[in-house]
């Protein structure tokens, strides 16, 4: 298979496909990702998304159909999940700056001030004109919790439309497969041990044509006064989510669904998350507790979960 490795969107991206014109397709995929990063970024003041944010409280902004589609999807999930997933969390993300060199523990008054600006009901969408309006000055949409899944799905759509039958799209913690590998029946995707000091794998899942998305408190964090502050923020409290979950891995057909459910479930207890996910067709999960225990949804055994320790 032909492979292309990229450093984009703050992560290492690996694209592998089998196709007579693989190099041409991979080059086009790279341009697609660069275009997405340029337009969808919440960290580039010149992006189309930031143009929406810069006009918060001022006026609606027209955006391209694909960006509108993703914002609308994120908005619907934000409302239906009681903000466990929250597309307007941008002001809080930029206050904490977790994942950047200037990450900080904000003071309480600043957190409370930002909480007033992360209300998804204050996003107004015009589905005919493709305009987005943020009603309150200082509001900011951040698509970081959903964008990579959307990008992966669009890349797969493109590759498949060009006749690719075998491939793997790895956007760093977000893996989406096309068909089956050339030499075996299933792709093997590892699930990382959340304890970043020990490293290694808890296990692997074997999939064909599906997506594996993992999110964990070990991905981006900092320590302050001996306490770990991770990047998964609670839009109700303004602080990193407190709970018993260390990592969540979602197996699904669409990568965007994996992104959504890893975020939503972090705001739940393990028992709540397993109960909810057991009721959703086509969504399976592996959840690892902060104590290192492994929990799976009922149907995960059909996906050949292999648990082991290193």
Image (spheres, helix red, strand yellow):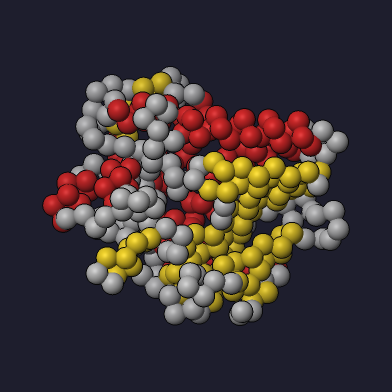
145 relative to 121 in the view: left or right: right
Residue 240 location (% of width, % of height): 32, 60
Residue visible at 77% across and 35% down?
23
101 relative to 224 in the view: left or right: right
Q: Is residue 275 above or below residue 127?
A: below
Rendered-image quadrant of the C terminus: bottom right
Tell me the quarter of the picture where residue 185 sits: bottom right
The reply to whether residue 258 is visible in this rendering is yes
The reply to whether residue 236 is visible in this rendering is no
Residue 256 location (% of width, % of height): 55, 47
Residue visible at 63% across and 50% down?
170
Residue 158 location (% of width, % of height): 69, 34
| Nearer to us in this view, 242 or 26 | 26
Residue visible at 39% across and 65% down?
268
Residue that lies at the very extreme toward the left in this rendered image: 109
Tell me the quarter of the picture where residue 162 sits: top right
Residue visible at 79% across and 40% down?
164
Tell me the quarter of the picture where residue 190 sits: bottom right
**Count of marks placed on residues:** 0
236 relative to 264 in the view: left or right: left
Residue 10 location (% of width, % of height): 49, 45
């Amino acid at each position: 298979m032909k492979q292309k490795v990229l450093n984009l969107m703050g992560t290492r991206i690996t694209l592998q496909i089998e196709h007579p014109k693989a190099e041409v397709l991979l080059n086009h995929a790279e341009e697609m990702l660069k275009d997405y990063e340029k337009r969808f970024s919440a960290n580039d003041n010149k992006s189309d998304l930031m143009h929406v944010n810069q006009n918060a409280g001022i006026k609606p902004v027209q955006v391209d159909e694909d960006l509108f589609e993703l914002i609308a999807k994120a908005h619907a999930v934000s409302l239906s999940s009681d903000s466990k997933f929250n597309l307007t969390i941008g002001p809080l993300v930029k206050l904490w700056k977790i994942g950047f060199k200037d990450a900080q523990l904000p003071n309480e008054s600043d957190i409370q001030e930002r909480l007033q600006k992360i209300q998804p009901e204050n996003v107004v969408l015009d589905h005919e004109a493709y305009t987005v309006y943020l009603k309150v000055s200082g509001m900011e949409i951040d698509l970081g919790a959903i964008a990579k899944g959307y990008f992966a799905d669009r890349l797969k759509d493109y590759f498949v439309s060009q006749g690719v039958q075998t491939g793997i799209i790895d956007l760093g913690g977000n893996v989406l497969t096309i068909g089956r590998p050339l030499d075996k029946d299933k792709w093997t995707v590892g699930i990382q041990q959340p304890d970043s000091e020990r490293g290694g794998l808890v296990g692997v899942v074997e999939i064909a044509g599906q997506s594996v998305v993992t999110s964990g408190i070990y991905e981006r964090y900092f320590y302050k006064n001996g306490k770990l502050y991770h990047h998964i923020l609670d839009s109700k409290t303004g602080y990193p989510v407190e709970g018993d979950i260390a990592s969540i891995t979602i197996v699904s057909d669409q990568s965007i669904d994996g992104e959504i459910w890893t975020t939503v479930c972090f705001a739940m207890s393990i028992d709540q998350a397993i109960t909810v996910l057991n009721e959703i067709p086509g969504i399976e999960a592996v959840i690892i507790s902060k104590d290192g225990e492994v929990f799976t949804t009922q149907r995960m055994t059909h996906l050949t979960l292999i648990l082991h320790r290193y």
